């Protein structure tokens, strides 16, 4: 395992030593923050306030800010790990694989060094973003998560990072040049915003489109993170509107579905356990295929 950790350390150094690589790997989350601050925040606040008939917008802003933090965190699990794979692409283009294999390192150790580094970057960057966002929520006096919700979010981030590490590794094995890799990063980073309901929430889309997007791992990973992260803010908002209502649980469900914190496919609710099973299965499939592809490439 010493050889594997040596490769992990080397790949992490390749990633962090280039500020532009780090920056471009975070373009998707940064674009999301800019769009939210300039456009989406006000639009979401007005939509939710009109839907609930509210004049006091403090709790609405709290919910929207929590939504933004969870959404940016989800995007980071994909874009950061994709950026880490620049080391793999550079090694493939330059022919370094042949040099490595002259040494005592084995193919599975070399491949593991890339995969573990990809997972580590996606996980760490997402956690830093989420914890920073929760610090903002604390300073602004918004509703905070309890211990159980924190554990749920951390588990969701870990699963999301693992899923997208396997997915990105598989996809990048089909790129042969730095140019194709750059184009892939741009396309995936942009598409992630739409496919995870970051740029358009379900209430603004046709039901059939919402159902299709909800079947994809991008929206499912986002919902798994959003659900526990948004529940305190959503509950505080509904307590203001429905302090004694018997149907507050139904109202919470409707509100969470409208902002893609909970998903519905053709009228059927997707539970968190369904999403966990789906993402776990996809991770296994992506991982097996990525391992097979890497075995063919690393020669």
Image (spheres, rainbow, N blue to C red):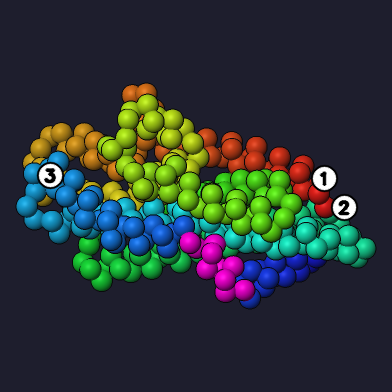
Q: Is residue 135 above or below residue 254?
A: below
User: Which residue is identified by label 2?
Assistant: 299
Can residue 76 be found in the magenta stretch?
no
Which secondary structure type mostly characterizes the magenta part of the structure? Answer: helix
Asked whether disc 1 touches disc 2, contact meaning CB atoms under 8 Å apart, the reply is: yes
**Disc 3/disc 2 C-alpha distance (Å):** 60 Å
Q: Is residue 89 above or below residue 252?
A: below
- How far from the left and from the top, in percent, is residue 196? 42, 44
User: Mark 1 Cα within 10 Å, few/some/many (few <14, many 20+)?
Assistant: few
**Disc 1/disc 2 C-alpha distance (Å):** 7 Å
Residue drawn at x 34%, y 44% is 200
Q: Circle 2 sits in a helix, a strand or a loop, which is it?
A: loop
Instruction: Check the image and name the residue furthest to the right.
Output: 102
Q: Which mark is residue 5?
A: none
User: Which residue is identified by label 3?
Assistant: 50
Q: Circle 3 sits in a helix, a strand or a loop, which is it?
A: helix
**Disc 3/disc 1 C-alpha distance (Å):** 56 Å
User: Mark 2 Cα within 10 Å, few/some/many (few <14, many 20+)?
Assistant: some
Q: Circle 1 sits in a helix, a strand or a loop, which is it?
A: helix
Earlier along the polypeptide chain: callout 3 or callout 2?
3
Q: Which residues are magenta?
A: 18-27
User: Which residue is identified by label 1?
Assistant: 296
Does residue 91 appear to the left or right of 209 in the view shown? Answer: right
Does residue 57 appear to the left or right of 92 in the view shown? Answer: left
Residue drawn at x 57%, y 46% is 163
Earlier along the polypeptide chain: callout 3 or callout 1?
3
User: Mark 3 Cα within 10 Å, few/some/many (few <14, many 20+)?
Assistant: few
- How far from the left and from the top, in percent, is residue 194? 42, 44
């Amino acid at each position: 395992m010493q050889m594997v950790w040596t490769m992990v350390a080397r790949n992490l150094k390749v990633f962090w030593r280039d500020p532009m690589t780090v920056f471009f790997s975070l373009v998707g989350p940064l674009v999301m923050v800019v769009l939210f601050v300039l456009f989406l925040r006000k639009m979401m606040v007005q939509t939710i306030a009109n839907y609930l008939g509210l004049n006091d917008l403090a709790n609405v802003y709290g919910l929207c800010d929590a939504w933004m933090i969870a959404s940016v965190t989800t995007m980071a699990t994909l874009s950061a790990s994709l950026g880490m794979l620049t080391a793999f692409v550079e090694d493939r283009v330059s022919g370094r694989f042949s040099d490595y294999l002259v040494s005592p390192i084995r193919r599975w150790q070399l491949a593991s060094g890339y995969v573990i580094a990809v997972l580590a970057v996606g996980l760490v960057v997402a956690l830093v973003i989420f914890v920073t966002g929760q610090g903002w929520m604390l300073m602004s006096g918004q509703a905070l998560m309890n211990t159980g919700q924190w554990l749920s979010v951390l588990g969701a981030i870990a699963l999301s990072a693992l899923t997208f590490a396997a997915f990105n590794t598989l996809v990048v094995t089909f790129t042969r040049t730095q140019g194709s890799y750059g184009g892939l990063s741009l396309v995936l980073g942009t598409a992630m915003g739409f496919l995870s309901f970051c740029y358009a929430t379900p209430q603004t889309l046709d039901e059939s489109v919402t159902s299709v997007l909800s079947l994809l791992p991008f929206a499912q990973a986002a919902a798994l993170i959003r659900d526990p992260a948004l529940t305190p803010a959503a509950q505080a908002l509904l307590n203001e509107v429905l302090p004694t209502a018997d149907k507050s649980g139904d109202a919470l469900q409707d509100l969470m579905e409208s902002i893609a914190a909970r998903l519905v496919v053709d009228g059927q609710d997707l539970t968190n356990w369904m999403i966990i099973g789906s993402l776990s299965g996809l991770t296994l499939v992506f991982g097996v295929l990525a391992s097979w592809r890497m075995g063919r490439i690393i020669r």
